[in-house]
Amino acid sequence: MLSPEGLVAAAAVLMGLALLAWRLWAGRLEVPGDVGEEEEEEEEEGIPFMAEEGSGHCRLLCKPSALAQHLVRSLGRSAALRGGRWLWPCWPRLQMLWQLLQPPEPEPVVARELLQLSDAGLVALDWLVGPWGAAGGGGGVSSPVLLLIPNAAGKVTGGLLQLGLRALERGFIPVIFNRRGHNGCPLTTPRLQPFGDPGDLREAVTYLRCRHPCASLLAVSEGSGSGLLLAYLGESGSSSRLAAAACLSPIFRGRDWFEARMPWLYEWPLLLHLKQGLSRYAGALAEVVDTDRLLGSRSLRELEETLFCRTRTPHSWESYWERNEPLRDADEAAVPVLCLCSADDPVRGPPARSLPRELFRSSPYFFLLLTPHGGHCGFPRRGPGRCWAHEAVLEYFRAMAEFLRTEERRKGLPRPRRWGGHPVEPPVFTWQRSYTR
């Protein structure tokens, strides 16, 4: 039986399909990917991979380096970037709806762990143990741990779960990070996590390092959840404890994204998802925010502003984003980050305004893999897996491991972030306790 959220989402899909059919019949549907001459010229920047349709025409924009050359060779050999002639990638809005509604295949088995933070708040870590039960899948003691970060609304999509299952098959240890009050995580303090505040994520990463001291730590974020990962990498610098990271369809400019008009077929399901979660804690949140205004919000921006700016100790919208912009400390990042983006992403917006190309040109740590068609977190392909970006991310992590091992052998010195093996220094862990259920 469908939940109220599922019914609304299904109704939105039917209305969207009807609208798209009418516009196609009327001949008034824009061809996705059609861009102005200025954007078209910008999209030609970078290193090309393929000359085919589908996932082809991918280009890698980055600062020249030995690591960049290695990634070009590795990704260029990957079958994930080989597309064929197929119409589905040309409909990004339908991809977006499918991404929000599709169930994972097979249904994963999850073991939840509740972690108590320094202020007595809780975050939930969902360990994917596979569709085989607790005894199947997974890697050994030194297998890499893959931290999966959902979008900012806490919606764990079928695509994110599918990525976790693919990683589990490859020997990774996947775990989903759920923010306070999201996805069934209890809210024990009248405080939720702002868009770009990495404090809770930092404590969770430190805990993972303590629990898996011999494993490398990796992270992947989806959509607006990338704001949290990018903020964490910039704020932590070389102390992030991560070996590599990747972002699927990231939102780089948080304030611009909230202030721009998002597709209502995307915004309303997420808004309803957030309101359902917040309504469980209306009594506790009433101490700090106007819950009637909060639950009556008609946009993600109005909800975000009510939740974090119109509190008992109010802050301006401008000062909120001074502390929460994802790229505010991007110059301090010291971990390789692969950002997979599509030029026709209907959620992020036009590439000319929403992609910080100068960051990828100047920083040796940021890599932009840009494709003309892929929608928002969709990147569809025919055959098993359905999303070629998942294979590209896992290939990127494999290439990073290979590159780091080669560098270690060449220099003859141990690296602080090892890909397996014992770390140079023991991790620091200061919690009194954590809760498990």
Image (cartoon, grey):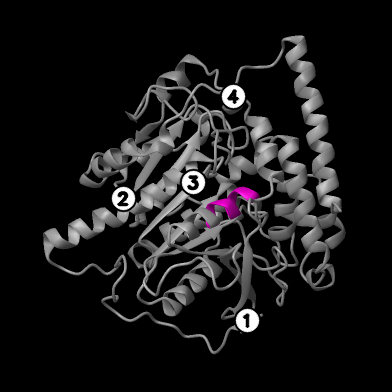
- Find residue 80 and report its horizontal and vertical position in percent: 43, 38
Asked if disc 2 and disc 4 are in contact, CB closer than 8 Å, the reply is: no
Q: Nearer the viewer, residue 328 or 359?
A: 359
Residue at 34% x, 40% y is 75
Measured in 3D between alpha carbons, the distance from the residue under mark 3 to the one under mark 2, in whole angstroms, is 14 Å
Q: Which residues are magenta?
A: 158-164
Question: Which comes before the other along the chain, label 3 or label 4?
Answer: 4
* Label 4 SS: helix
Asked if disc 1 and disc 3 are in contact, CB closer than 8 Å, the reply is: no
Q: What is the number of the mark on residue 436?
A: 1
Q: What is the number of the mark on residue 90?
A: 4
Q: Nearer the viewer, residue 387 or 120?
A: 387
Q: What is the number of the mark on residue 390?
A: 3
Q: Amino acid at mark 1?
A: Thr
Q: Amino acid at mark 3?
A: His
- Eyeballing the image, is 372 above or below 209? above
Residue at 24% x, 40% y is 69
Q: Nearer the viewer, residue 142 or 322?
A: 142
Measured in 3D between alpha carbons, the distance from the residue under mark 1 to the one under mark 2, in whole angstroms, is 34 Å
* Label 1 SS: strand
Q: Amino acid at mark 4?
A: Cys
Q: Please tell me whether residue 161 belongs to the stretch shown in magenta.
A: yes
Whether residue 321 is visible:
no
Q: Nearer the viewer, residue 202 or 307?
A: 202
Q: What is the number of the mark on residue 399?
A: 2
Position of 231 with respect to 103 (left or right) is left
- Find residue 395 and report its horizontal and vertical position in percent: 38, 48
Q: Please tell me whether residue 389 belongs to the stretch shown in magenta.
A: no
